[in-house]
Amino acid sequence: MALQSKLFRGDAKLEAALVSDSAHIVQGAIGSHVSKIQQALNELDGAGLNPDENYGPATASAVLAYKQKRNIINRSYQTRADNIVGKMTMAALDAEMREKERKTEPGPDTDAITATLKKDHPASFAVTQRVAAPTFTIPKAVRPPVIFSPNKQFRFNEFKPEADFHDLLFEVKKGGRVFWIGAAVPKRITDFSRAQMYFTPSTVKPGPNGVPIVLADDKDYQAFTGGWATRMRNFIPMMGVQAAAAEKPVTLLITFMKATAFSALNDDNVFKDRPVQTLNVVMNAIKRHVGAAPFSSVIDKLGVSSFSSGVTPMKLCIGALAPSGLVKEVFNFDGPFLAAHRKELTHVPKGVVSRIFTQHQLSPPPPGWVNLLPDHFRFVTETFGQLQPENIMHQRIGKMMYHQALANSIV
């Protein structure tokens, strides 16, 4: 009998722990085999361990909790679980990790999903950075956080969010199509079982005299050139630094989709086909780049957010992911400002937290609805080149409030 999971198999000390009582792994052990156990406990139980190769008190407590949840007890001489990784525990960890890895692998009856980091692409920085690309200035963010409609005397303060993060751009291929997903990954992050995902607004906006303004042309999407490279990809550092600077840093995925993908869950929408598997493939590609553990991850907690017209594809994604139970919270940044959008909370499956930050006033506001007034932003100077007060506020809500929303995230 040998270990089967990619994480464990071939490790001599773990293989020995599977078959030999004398090879049990106990508190005080040190080495790479301990790190793998810590990584598995993070993946399977969300233990939050630092994979430091040291079987200390925190790891021992996590092992005990793991065994208690699964009633792993050797009835021949025990009446309760202990904090030792022996034959039964090793077998259980290996079986669960193998099952998690299996869920990320393409089945025999499907085409493969690939996610390739585009290091040599003009729009890819593929670096760990505290600031964005030299051609783009990251706007400030606001605080303190709000979860209820603040009173008229409340004031936001603007500040410059700072954090080290990997700024990445991935080309995702599946079903003969190309899609693009950005990622902002906080430095030293170890938990890849949770993520946030941000949907960018539409690349086509109403213009004067009925002529639309095209920020990024669909014809340039396949190669990610034109406005996609020079304008839309800036959402990665803009929103990513706010996520990385949060009290509980989290990997942020940025979805880039053609304007045609906004109307329906069609072939141009990355989440039409195998949405959960696609996210897992991207997360594992991220792990390979940032040098995290080499075994496969499975996301089990996801928050989704968007601003303005990006709320439409966000809702399509929520529907596509609903059967998985993956989405745990939703942030809507001023979607009701748009005339075509319904003035109501984003519809979500039961148990999902839904919150909306908007200048569209409801009285009384329902739970999760945060009414915002111009005076709340009196001390904020960012205008984003807008002239009309309502447009200035729309941009501030969408581009400066993500950090404060994450302060109360459950993901």
Image (spheres, rainbow, N blue to C red):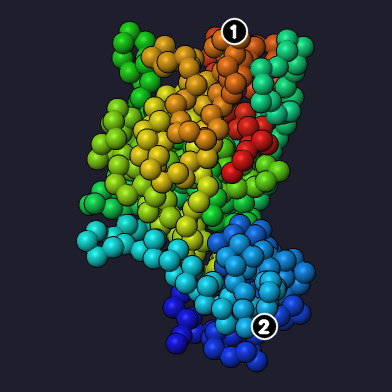
Q: Residue 56, how many percent across, how many down?
A: 76, 72
Is 111 positioned to the left or the right of 347 in the image?
Answer: left
Q: Is residue 110 above or below residue 169?
A: below
Q: Which mark is residue 363?
A: 1
How many other residues sit within 10 Å of disc 1, few (<14), some (14-19) or many (≥20)?
Answer: few
Which residue is at 31% across, 39% downward? 269
Which residue is at 54% across, 71% downward? 93
Which callout, 2 or 1, points at the residue further toward the start of the chain? Answer: 2
Q: Nearer the viewer, mark 2 or mark 1?
A: 2
Q: Which residue position holds label 2? A: 77
Q: Residue 184, how many percent across, how many down?
A: 55, 48
Q: Is residue 226 above or below residue 26?
A: above
Q: Quadrant of the N terminus?
A: bottom left
Q: Residue 116, how many percent across, how many down?
A: 39, 58
Q: Evaluate if marks 2 and 1 touch, with contact meaning CB atoms under 8 Å apart.
A: no
Q: Nearer the viewer, residue 4 or 307?
A: 4
Q: Is residue 352 above or below residue 42?
A: above
Asked which quadrant contains residue 201, the reply is top left
Is 265 positioned to the left or the right of 85 in the image?
Answer: left
Is 241 positioned to the left or the right of 15 in the image?
Answer: right
Q: Quadrant of the C terminus?
A: top right
Q: Nearer the viewer, residue 381 or 62?
A: 62
